[in-house]
Amino acid sequence: MGRVPPTPLHEHAAEDLRFIRDTMARAAAFTAVPGWGGVIIGATALVAAAVAGRPQNSFAWLQIWLAEAGLAVTIGLVAVVQKARRSEVPIAGAATRRFLLAFLPALVAGGALTVVFAREHLTERLPGCWLLCYGAAVASGGALSVHVVPIMGVTFMIVGTFALLAPSAWGTLLMAVGFGLLHIGFGFVIARKYGG
């Protein structure tokens, strides 16, 4: 029987480096949460609140906020990609996938509830639903990001819970507080402390 030659040292080192790199990628936090993007999203939400007026069981009110949601998603995606490029964070990496797996389920739930609320003529109660579901998404995804992001999510959940319990006439005001002022405030913190 022939003796198996030992594995060269450089192959062991390369294998160890691959293992370390893979482990670090799996453990990395999602740091591309955009602070300045959040500020812009907050500003557009304040405009939407001013245009939409008091919550109503009307298609026009719902249409304004759905257009705002589409605009916010677009701004958010562009801002994430830009921040990831500046920070040299791989946008298609494991950290991004884990963040999305934690972030998206609550948003999907909010989308399904939106259809039900609109069909049942409960559109004026959507502000609490949206704030609560968005807060849950941010808190869940934020657990894989910098520590201020889950705090932001919990704050949205508190405003959303209050909106569900408050008179429906307060809905747009609470949407302005949540989607407007909270995005602006937390966006500034993220931008200043976490690189944009």
Image: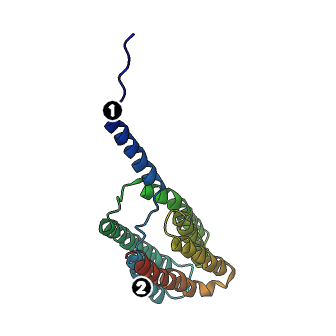
Inspect this view and state whether residue 112 appears.
yes
| Residue topped by disc 1 | 8
Give how far across and how far down residue 186 sits, in percent: 49, 80
**Which of 93/41 is in front?**
93
Crowding near the residue tagged with mark 2, few <14, some 14–19, many ≥20 C-alpha atoms within 10 Å? some
Q: Residues within 10 Å of mark 1 (few under 14, many from 20)?
A: few
Type of amino acid under label 2? Ala
> Tag 2's secondary structure?
helix
The location of residue 128, given as percent across then percent down, is 61, 76
Image mark for residue 43: 2
Q: On the picture, is 55 further left or further right than 3?
A: right
Which comes sooner in the sequence, label 2 or label 1? 1
Figure check: 6 above or below 176: above
What colour scheme was applied to this rendering of the protein?
Answer: rainbow
| Secondary structure state at the residue bearing disc 1 | loop
Q: Is residue 9 above or below residue 37?
A: above
